[in-house]
């Protein structure tokens, strides 16, 4: 069921497979064109954030707004929260920078390159150099270490917000959050 829609058709998610890196982290294998480096811009303040995803851009921006609503703090989330309180939510827009990486490692290098080129640590919202030097916390699901909860959620075809809520608010195990273990925690 985790890879199928209710009508039985294949669920659309960007991962076509997975590989384990030399560091032991599970990373996505996606079709070329699905490895995306994106830019979130605050049009009024002229500040930028560079990020990467293997999913769609609208969903990624929605994920950032979910983190703002959950009270997470970073340079980007604090600016988004302030803009939202001022009625400027639409000033934050996302756009594709490039989608030509052949694998996840190349995607991480492209992210680092764009962060450096745009100087978004000093003049923007990035807080880390990107790539594997970014800020995600690895998570182990069914014996595999994923680079982040987002990566695990995308691989198992679970909405990232739901995956995170199941773990942080409901106290589910990562296997339960991914739909691998049907026992419910109440």
Image (tube, helix red, strand yellow):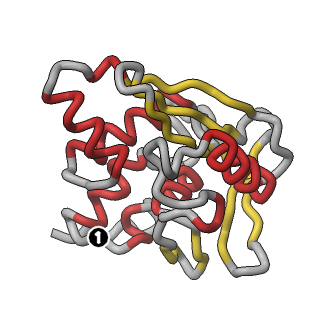
Circle 1 residues within 10 Å: few <14, some 14–19, many ≥20? many
Q: Does residue 31 appear to the left or right of 172 in the view shown?
A: right
In this rendering, the answer to whether 54 lies above or below 61 is below
Residue 99 versus residue 135 in the image, above or below: above
Q: Residue 96: x and y, percent?
A: 63, 27
Asked which quadrant contains residue 11, the reply is: top right
Q: Quadrant of residue 178?
A: bottom left
> Is 129 above or below relative to 107?
below
Residue plotted at (38% across, 67% down) = 176
Residue furthest front in the image: 122
Q: Which residue is mark 1?
A: 172
Image quarter for residue 134? Answer: bottom right
Residue 184's x, y, as percent? 26, 67
Label 1: state its secondary structure: loop
Percent position (x, y) of residue 41?
A: 46, 28
Quarter of the image with the C terminus in it: bottom left
Residue at 28% over, 60% down: 166
């Amino acid at each position: 069921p985790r890879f199928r829609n209710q009508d039985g058709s294949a669920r659309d998610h960007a991962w076509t497979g997975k590989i384990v890196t030399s560091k032991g982290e599970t990373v996505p294998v996606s079709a070329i064109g699905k490895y995306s480096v994106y830019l979130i811009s605050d049009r009024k303040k002229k500040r930028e954030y560079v990020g990467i995803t293997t999913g769609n851009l609208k969903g990624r921006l929605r994920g950032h707004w979910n983190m703002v609503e959950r009270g997470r703090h970073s340079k980007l989330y604090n600016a988004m929260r302030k803009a939202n309180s001022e009625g400027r939510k639409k000033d934050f827009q996302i756009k594709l920078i490039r989608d030509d990486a052949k694998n996840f490692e190349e995607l991480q290098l492209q992210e680092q390159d764009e962060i450096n080129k745009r100087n978004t640590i000093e003049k923007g919202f990035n807080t880390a150099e990107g790539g594997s030097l970014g800020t995600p916390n690895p998570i182990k699901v069914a014996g595999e270490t994923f680079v982040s909860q987002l990566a695990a959620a995308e691989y198992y075809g679970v909405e990232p917000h739901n995956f995170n809520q199941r773990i942080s608010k409901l106290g589910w195990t990562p296997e339960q959050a991914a739909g691998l273990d049907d026992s419910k925690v109440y």
